[in-house]
Amino acid sequence: MPTLLLYGVFLVYPMLKGIYLSLFDWSGGSETYNFIGLENYKNMFHDEVIPKTIRNDYILVIGKVIGFMIPTLLLAVALTRFRIKGAGFYRSVFFIPNVISVVVVGVLWRFIYNPNIGFINSFISGVTGKPFQFAWLGEKWSIFALLPTSIWAGIGFTIILLIAGILNIPESLYESANIDGAKQWQQFWNITLPLAWEQVQTSVIWIVTTTLSGSFIIVSIMTFEGGVDNATQVMSSYLYAQAFHYGNFSYGATIGVLILVIALITTITLQRLMKRESIELT
């Protein structure tokens, strides 16, 4: 009951309240609520920024799923199956970015991308021997520049989750595979991946939901809330701008409903695509 109460107060009620507010014209500070029905939804479908935000969100989702899962699977296997000396130390190192404030991460990477004093441009200048200045966060495709930041900041959690799944696999299965002459990649494909699939699925769903709902912090800090011509604008950052900058809370709530619907559809679709029969070990 306490858990259900907390869930209702901090999740269900705000969600229902957001849907309710989307049916009104409310600035956020006024005491009057003007009922306008589905007018906010009509305006949203005619808003030219909305398609850009959805596109950018899915660029981040697809890029982060690929950028997270491939290296994390390799690193998790390396830190568990290859008996690397000091594996515990490396796990801690990979997890450090997860405990750093997202604001600090955004500021740090903004300096890395700085066209004048940033590490990337300085490194390229040092390698080529010629001055190199490029505005990584000031281009129309700068949404892709946010991917390394997002992956670096959250990869540690996924590694720990996958390591936990791999460590639960009985060692006897690998011993039998070695006796049968199975190579490392065969063991990974036929033992590790199937038996750690629940952790893989959980990781993918976590990446998708946190990206669709929480990318606005990185966007706001690194590209000053949308970048050039809304090049990095995502749904959550656009919601924040509409509600807190322009005082259009009702329209922000409408965008929140859009995020909810898209996140639900994406999550349910992924769960069905990634569904596998559970393997019970006896």
Image (cartoon, rainbow, N blue to C red):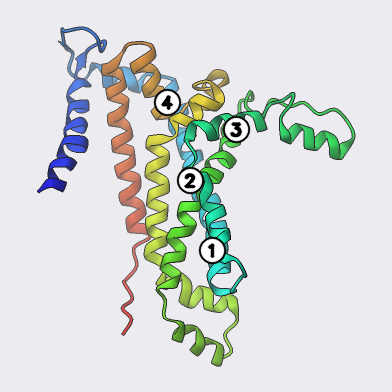
Residue 8 relative to residue 69: left or right = left
Residue tagged by mark 4? 237
| Label 4 crowd (10 A; few <14 / some 14-19 / many >=20) | many
Residue lying farthest to the right in this orientation: 129
Q: Which mark is residue 88?
A: 1
Say if residue 141 shows up in the picture. Answer: no
Residue 94 relative to residue 170: left or right = right
Q: Mark 1 or mark 3, which has the lower sequence index?
A: 1
Whether pointer 2 and pointer 3 mark residues with C-beta atoms closer than 8 Å, the reply is no
Measure the alpha-carbon separation of dots 1 and 3. Answer: 26 Å
Q: Nearer the viewer, mark 1 or mark 4?
A: 1
Give amino acid for label 4: Ser
Q: What element carries label 3?
A: helix
Q: Mark 2 or mark 1, which has the lower sequence index?
A: 1
Residue in view at x 58 percent, y 19 percent: 228
Measure the alpha-carbon separation of dots 2 and 1. Answer: 16 Å
Residue tagged by mark 2? 98
Q: What element carries label 1?
A: helix
Relative to the observer, which residue lies in front, 148 or 84? Answer: 84
Q: What element carries label 2?
A: helix
Q: Mark 4 or mark 3, which has the lower sequence index?
A: 3
Residue in view at x 33 percent, y 38 percent: 262
